[in-house]
Image (spheres, helix red, strand yellow):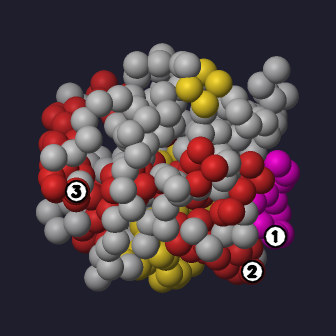
Amino acid sequence: YNGEIAGKSRICKSNEVLEEQIKSNPGRLQVLEEIENQTKSFIQSKRPGNGGSGGGGNDNEPPTDFPVVTIPVYVHVIYNSSQENISEAQINSQMQVLNEDFRMTNSDANQAPSEFADRAADTQIQFTLAGITRKFSNKTSWGTRDDMKKSSQGGVDPIDPAKYLNIWVCNIGGGILGYAQFPGGSSSTDGVVIGPQYFGTQGYVAAPFDGGRTTTHEVGHYLNLRHIWGDGRCRQDDYVNDTPSSDRANYGCPSYPTNHCKSNDMTMNYMDYVDDACMYMFSNGQKLRMRSVLESGGARAGLVN
């Protein structure tokens, strides 16, 4: 049993959207590879003695200290019903969760089992609300084809996406909680999309995804994190050393230890598919990946002012 009750399992379409982008634009793959090379050499440079630890998926990354950076955020609320026109309080509750989760000040941060506790990271990334736009639409669901990001399609164009994280809050439909664009994609569609009932912790929210963690997960993708199981079999990698290999998503609230690929899954990682109440950490290795795209020369360096 893996918690996949109808309508109750976490569905994120970021990986599928990326596959579509690669299909329609072969140059997208090359850009991804360039970002990957930059990320690898950045992480290598941060390792003690620059020797790196090489090897498989369970090598601990040492914690690394960085200046705290602040990413400014525009939230675009596109609504069909008054419920979907979420309140400023609901938006602020999401900003609070983002800041707590990325700075490891979340109240559940201390729940990690001892096996993973020393890998939990304060990413030293925080977020500030730059502005909110609101737009009524006759559309009741938007899908994952980026129409909500185009005023020509009745959506809202992103505001200066090189300098701001744009988040569209609208009903995606099909049970999809959210999706993000990985770094290096077209600026005209850059950002994160979240369903209104999965955004924030108060107001129009639906359990078990009412803890604001869908946005934490999608912003992880936006900053170049993959799903923790690598969207494939045991050897399919999420490009992070200190997250154990796994061959599947976990759902619901798995008990520890949950074992796949001959190691315990880090089910409580934000990049798995568990319920909001059961995910509460990024790893040191994931922090290095995210920080690498924010470095000078990184794919998202413009977000850091």
Q: Amino acid at mark 2?
A: Ala
Provide the residue designation for mark 3: 48
Density class for disc 3 (Cα within 10 Å; few <14, some 14-19, many ≥20) is few
Q: CA distance from mark 2 to mark 3?
A: 44 Å
Which portion, as a residue range, is magenta?
200-211
Considering depth in this image, is 92 or 277 the residue closer to the camera? 277
What label does residue 89 carry, if any? 2
Residue 41, percent from left and from top: 15, 49
Vertical arrangement, residue 202 with respect to residue 183, above or below: below
Residue drawn at the location 56% of the way across and 78% of the way down = 132
**Magenta stretch: helix, strand or loop mostly:** loop
Residue drawn at the location 49% of the way across and 67% of the way down = 122
Provide the residue designation for mark 1: 202
> Is 261 inside the magenta-drawn segment?
no
Vertical arrangement, residue 55 with respect to residue 83, above or below: above
Disc 3 element: helix
For marks 2 and 3 on the same chain, the one whose residue lies earlier in the sequence? 3
Disc 2 element: helix
Residue drawn at the location 31% of the way across and 25% of the way down = 23
Residue 217, percent from left and from top: 56, 51
